[in-house]
Image (spheres, rainbow, N blue to C red):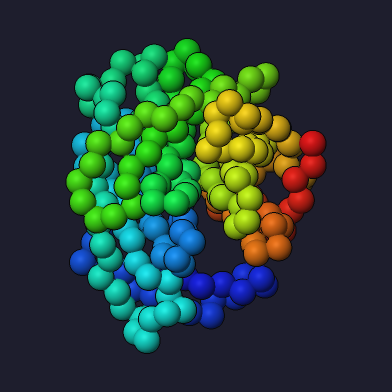
Amino acid sequence: MLYKLNSKGEIIRKVYIKSVTNTDWEDLANDYNGNIYIADIGNNLNKRKHLQILKIPHPDSLNTDTIRPQIIQFKYENQKLFPPEQADLNFDAEALIAYDDSLFIFTKNRSKPYSKYTYVYAIPNKAGEYIAILQDSIYLPRTKKLHSWITGASRHPNKDVVVLISHRKAWLITNFRNKNEQTLTRSRVSGIYSQKEAITFDLEGNLWISNEKYKCLRAKLKKSVFTN
């Protein structure tokens, strides 16, 4: 089920995604044409061999509350063992963005010892079966594992800017598509530590962060501003 919320957290519409199973749905992304991508890419044990992303038209364009998605299946190009050795546990992922005609996946690094890298993979945004190609690795220094596990990502609606979120910190990547000019800026997210699961830009460039229920903390949706 896909839920549409208003800024008060009230559910104002539900869309049923038919003919698929929710193995471990994680991030949502949207492209410039308004299509929505649902990332069924959660892989805590790094042993899933069948990962997929579901593509549907924007719900506001639908005259029905039930939709059959297009399915984008993929495997990571450099995963040979399921699961891999502990030092290579970097095939779990919770973060996704759509950019031009590609989807970019940011991994949640579970390596032991912890290497502090999130890997960036790319696949086409069309239905089919693909090999996810490693595009880049992003080093997240001077931070603990739980503070740098990437759990969500978003692309700015008008700029070549991407934001990543973890339980405690956020990272702003400028010139995302130009590696030679790419910069990474870190910010501590205001408020107490929580299990943040998603981040998105609104049309004005503001950030919205959601966190799931964590111990005694309630699930929340929060508007935030990125500060260096």
Given the current orientation, which residue lies at the most extreme bottom position? 63
The answer to which image quadrant residue 185 occupies is top right
Relative depth, front residue between 96 and 93: 96
Q: Position of residue 4 (x, y in %)?
A: 51, 73
Give the quadrant of the N terminus.
bottom left
Give the quadrant of the C terminus.
top right
Q: How many marks?
A: 0
Q: Position of residue 22 (x, y in %)?
A: 30, 56
Relative depth, front residue between 49 and 132: 132
Give the vertical position of 25 relative to 104 (above or below).
below
Q: Residue drawn 71% across and 63% down?
A: 204
Q: Position of residue 76 (x, y in %)?
A: 29, 32
The answer to which image quadrant residue 104 occupies is top left
Q: Position of residue 200 (x, y in %)?
A: 59, 55
Q: Residue drawn 62% across and 70% down?
A: 9
Can I make out residue 220 in this image?
Answer: no
Q: Residue drawn 43% across and 71% down?
A: 58
Q: Residue drawn 41% across and 65% down?
A: 35
Give the vertical position of 215 relative to 86 (above or below).
below
Left/right of residue 14 with respect to residue 75 in the rendered view: right
Left/right of residue 33 with respect to residue 68 in the rendered view: right
Can I make out residue 96 in this image?
Answer: yes
